[in-house]
Amino acid sequence: MIAVAVGLNLVIALFCFFVAWRLWRLSKTLGAVADALANWDRNARRILDPVAVPPAILRGQTGTAYLRQNYALLQFQIQRLEQVMGVVGIFPMANRWLRVRGRRPSPRIKMALSEKR
């Protein structure tokens, strides 16, 4: 009975040592990842510091802002043009409709219509 208890305790102890070893390795890995992220953050802040931004990037940002503004203006102009084209597209239909409504039937058609009655 003592041998079973000692064996069971050894198995439990080995399992606990294995878990502790895995946790120790995990903490080392997480520490290395945290150090790498801290270095990346520090480098990114140093590179993207507004005081030390290279002139080429500033020119690119200025050009992008200008293009966005022009694009918004062009979108507005396109919208207005589409509205004008829609109105202009109605004119031929309205012209045909007005011509047909304003047209008087010829006297021969009037006579033919009155004779049928």
Image: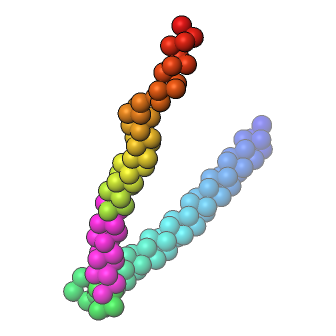
Residue 61 seen: no
Residue at coordinates 53% horizontally, 16% vertically from top-left? 113
Using the image as rendered, state which of residue 90 and residue 6 is in the foreground.
90
Q: Quadrant of the N terminus?
A: top right
Find residue 96 and report its image quarter: top left
Query: Where is residue 6 drawn, in percent x and y?
Result: 72, 46
Picture layout, residue 116 above or below residue 61: above
Using the image as rendered, state which of residue 106 and residue 27 is in the foreground.
106
Q: Quadrant of the C terminus?
A: top right
Specify the principal SS of the magenta part.
Answer: helix
Query: Where is residue 78 drawn, in percent x and y?
Result: 37, 61
In screen coordinates, is 14 left or right of 90?
Answer: right
Residue at coordinates 56% horizontally, 60% vertically from top-left? 23
Kindly give the residue lying farthest to the top in the view shown.
Answer: 117
Q: Is residue 11 magenta?
A: no
Using the image as rendered, state which of residue 25 and residue 75 is in the foreground.
75
In screen coordinates, is 49 left or right of 41?
Answer: left
Picture layout, residue 50 above or below residue 87: below
Query: Where is residue 95 drawn, in percent x and y?
Result: 40, 43
Q: Is residue 71 magenta?
A: yes
In screen coordinates, is 2 left or right of 39?
Answer: right
In screen coordinates, is 72 left or right of 8?
Answer: left
Residue at coordinates 36% horizontally, 48% vertically from top-left? 87
Which segment did they paint magenta? 59-76
Using the image as rendered, state which of residue 13 and residue 38 is in the foreground.
38
Query: Where is residue 11 drawn, in percent x and y?
Result: 72, 49
Kindly give the residue lying farthest to the left in the view shown.
Answer: 51
Residue at coordinates 62% horizontally, 56% vertically from top-left? 19
Residue 85 seen: yes
Colour mode of the rendering: rainbow
